[in-house]
Amino acid sequence: MPQLSGPWPPLSGAARAPWPRGVALASATITLVDQPADDYELLDAGDGRRLERFGAFVLDRPAPATDGVPRRLPGAWGAAAARYERTVGTGDHRWVPGDALPDRWTVTIAGIPMQLRPTRAGQVGVFPEHAAVAGWAAGRAEAVASAHGRPAAVLNLFAYTGLVSLALARAGARVVHVDASRPAVAWARQNAVLAGLADRPIRWLVEDAARFVARETRRKRCYDGVVLDPPTYGHGPGGGAWRLAEDLEPLLAAIRPLLAPGPWFVACTAHAAGMPPGLLAEAVTAALDPTPGASRVLELALEAASGARLAAGWAVLAASTPGLGRR
């Protein structure tokens, strides 16, 4: 197994130091994600907020990663159609004004139409920074299909509203889309209809990720690729709690037997507050043992024309062969 060269402690340690930008793994390098094109634009960020355009609507939402960072364009924030307000500890959360946004509208992210909705949690149904992961996974699925002469089989865990699943299906892959939220899976299926991909081979499953992986292992199923976007904290459909720091390693270890003996790829993401990149890379590398030189760490950060920067997390892109690790 390749050794890691960053200044982080082992996963079992209590202290967890950040991983400075620019440090490389022995088997991977850090790359900054490009801002997705189409209907999304980060306009500014700072003072704990983010100003973004999703299609025709400019939104002002919380961004804890920008606490203490001054805004670059203070005068631009008045253009927001709606602001999401959340009072910590009170449960008071709402969009203001409450009638400023439609119940739903459509944007195109990474070439895929996605239906957006203002949710009570302050989300709208898509994480634009995941466009880079979707593109990478789709490219790897095409490479696997070319090597095997058949469609790639890909498992997408914590799959949310389907951006990655639809990118994979568009690339010809056979996809198993798993999320613990029934509304999220229903939303993803509507996005498939919107994108003209409803007839593609996608299995839509409301399942706990760890339980599903365990069952697939017992069934001796194999996948050419696995994509997972685990939350920092969450609950499965049966009420069981998920904690990234405690539960990611066992899940990755359980995924390893599902990977096909031929070329395989895995993309694992973590949000900004969830896990430092060195720990994420260590967890993926220790569990999967990818080929040296076939993995890299992608910083999921967005940069505005104003010069503002929004750190949104990290992705470890791992593969069994160097050819599958390319962008």
Image: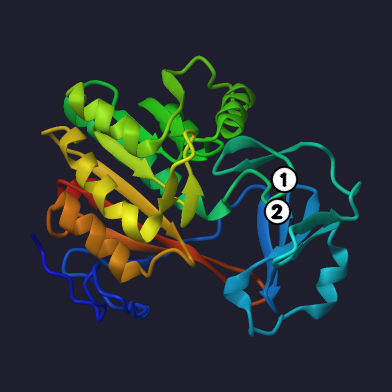
- Residue 145 visible? The answer is no
- Residue 247 visible? The answer is yes
Secondary element at tag 1: loop
Please report the residue visible at 53 percent of the width from the left and 39 percent of the height from the top: 160
Please identify the quarter of the rendering in which residue 30 is found.
Answer: bottom left
Could you say which is closer to the camera, residue 293 or residue 232? 232
Could you say which is closer to the camera, residue 256 or residue 265? 256
Say if 131 sits above or below 32 in the image.
above
Q: Residue furthest left?
A: 1
Please identify the quarter of the rendering in which residue 161 is found.
Answer: top right
Judge the density around disc 1: few (<14), some (14-19), many (≥20) Cα neighbours within 10 Å.
few
Secondary element at tag 2: loop
Type of amino acid at the residue the image marks with label 1: Thr
121 left or right, relative to 219: right
Assess whether mark 2 and mark 1 are in contact (beta carbons under 8 angstroms): yes
Q: Position of residue 196 (x, y in %)?
A: 58, 21
Q: Which mark is residue 51?
A: none
Say if 183 sits above or below 5 in the image.
above
Q: Position of residue 56 (x, y in %)?
A: 80, 48
Could you say which is closer to the camera, residue 81 or residue 143? 81
148 left or right, relative to 271: left
Q: Position of residue 117 (x, y in %)?
A: 73, 41
Give the total number of marks visible in the rendering: 2
Please identify the quarter of the rendering in which residue 183 is found.
Answer: top right
Distance of label 1 from label 2 (alpha carbons): 5 Å
To which residue does mark 1 refer? 119
Q: Position of residue 103 (x, y in %)?
A: 81, 37
Please report the residue visible at 20 percent of the width from the left and 21 percent of the height from the top: 219
Judge the density around disc 2: few (<14), some (14-19), many (≥20) Cα neighbours within 10 Å.
some
Type of amino acid at the residue the image marks with label 2: Gly
- Indicate the quadrant containing the N terminus: top left, top right, bottom left or bottom right: bottom left
To which residue does mark 2 refer? 122
